[in-house]
């Protein structure tokens, strides 16, 4: 896939979160965004997903301009699957119903077909026994796998993961990262924001390092982790990989 930013700027009040980013990122399947907290990673992901609008500049995904008008934006968003760090599951719905909801409510898939597709993913993610449980009855890792299934069930052109393991313990983190690695293996394209550097090193085709609202450098995972080109990236990796 190809992701292009031109003079991309996003502010919240007087605070500039993304500061005139211009870059072209090419990744066969997996782009991973890394960098210090507050560098703009999650904001950039939300802009790519059409969940927020830019203040200035443009974004193109495979040559298609990410729209800014609501009608076109709704259509664009319907082809993007997003997974947040806090799951964002509906607490009053079962796991099955949470997965089915985007199919029936947004994509107008008949309920029988939606149920079939949801069950296939529940079985694949080893969650079939929990299909009728509500989120409060599930572990954190199970909730996040339900959230991933909900994003995958619409068969999106692109998946977005915003720090999907930040609220999980190590065992649950491993469960979720394994699911993401399997998605890449089957050919799914995604952008991942993560602080799990070892996983980023393994799964990424392309790494973009964000700091102070800019993409300070980007390149293959091998090059980034072995020979970072900027002092900012070098210092960052020295800190996060020290222990």
Image (tube, grey):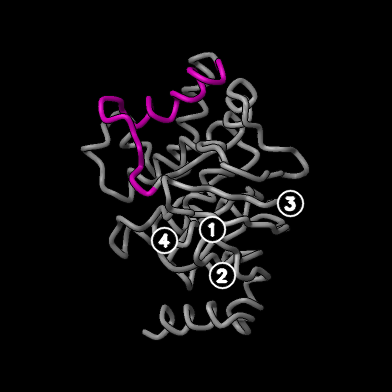
The residues colored magenta run 85-109
Q: Earlier in the sequence, mark 4 or mark 2?
A: 4
Looking at the rendered image, the quarter that the C terminus falls into is bottom left
The residue carrying mark 2 is 202
Q: Dot 4: within a 10 Å radius of its alpha carbon, few (fewer than 14), some, or many (20 or more) residues?
A: few
The residue carrying mark 3 is 2
Q: Residue furthest left?
A: 137
- Label placed on residue 38: 4
Q: Earlier in the sequence, mark 2 or mark 1?
A: 1
Residue 95 rendering spot, x and y as whole percentages: 34, 32
Q: Dot 3: within a 10 Å radius of its alpha carbon, few (fewer than 14), some, or many (20 or more) residues?
A: few
Residue 238 rendering spot, x and y as whole percentages: 46, 84
The residue carrying mark 1 is 181
Distance (Cα) linking label 1 and label 3:
20 Å
When the figure is inspected, residue 160 is found, relative to residue 96, above or below; the finding is below
What residue is at 49 percent from the left and 49 percent from the top?
Answer: 43
Q: Dot 2: within a 10 Å radius of its alpha carbon, few (fewer than 14), some, or many (20 or more) residues?
A: few
- Front residue of 73/223: it is 73
Residue 152 appears in the rendering: no
């Amino acid at each position: 896939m190809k992701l292009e930013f031109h003079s991309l700027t996003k502010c919240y009040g007087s605070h500039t979160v993304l500061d005139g980013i211009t870059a072209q990122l090419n990744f066969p399947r997996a782009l991973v965004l890394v960098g210090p907290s507050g560098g703009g990673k999650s904001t950039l992901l939300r802009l790519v997903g059409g969940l927020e609008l830019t203040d200035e500049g443009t974004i193109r995904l495979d040559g298609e301009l990410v729209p800014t008008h609501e009608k076109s934006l709704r259509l664009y968003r319907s082809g993007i699957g997003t997974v947040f760090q806090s799951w964002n599951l509906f607490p009053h719905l079962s796991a099955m119903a949470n997965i089915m909801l985007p199919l029936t409510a947004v994509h107008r898939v008949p309920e029988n077909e939606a149920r079939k597709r949801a069950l296939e993913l529940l079985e694949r993610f080893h969650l079939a026994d929990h299909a009728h449980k509500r989120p409060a009855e599930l572990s954190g890792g199970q909730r996040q796998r339900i959230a991933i299934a909900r994003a995958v069930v619409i068969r999106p052109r692109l998946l977005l993961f915003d720090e999907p393991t930040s609220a999980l313990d190590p065992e649950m983190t491993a469960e979720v990262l394994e699911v993401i690695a399997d998605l890449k293996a089957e050919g799914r394209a995604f952008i991942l924001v993560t602080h799990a550097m070892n996983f980023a090193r393994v799964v990424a085709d392309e790494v973009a390092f964000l700091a102070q609202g800019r993409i300070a450098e980007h390149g293959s995972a091998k090059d980034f982790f072995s020979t970072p080109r900027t002092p900012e990236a070098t210092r960052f990796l020295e800190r996060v990989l020290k222990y």
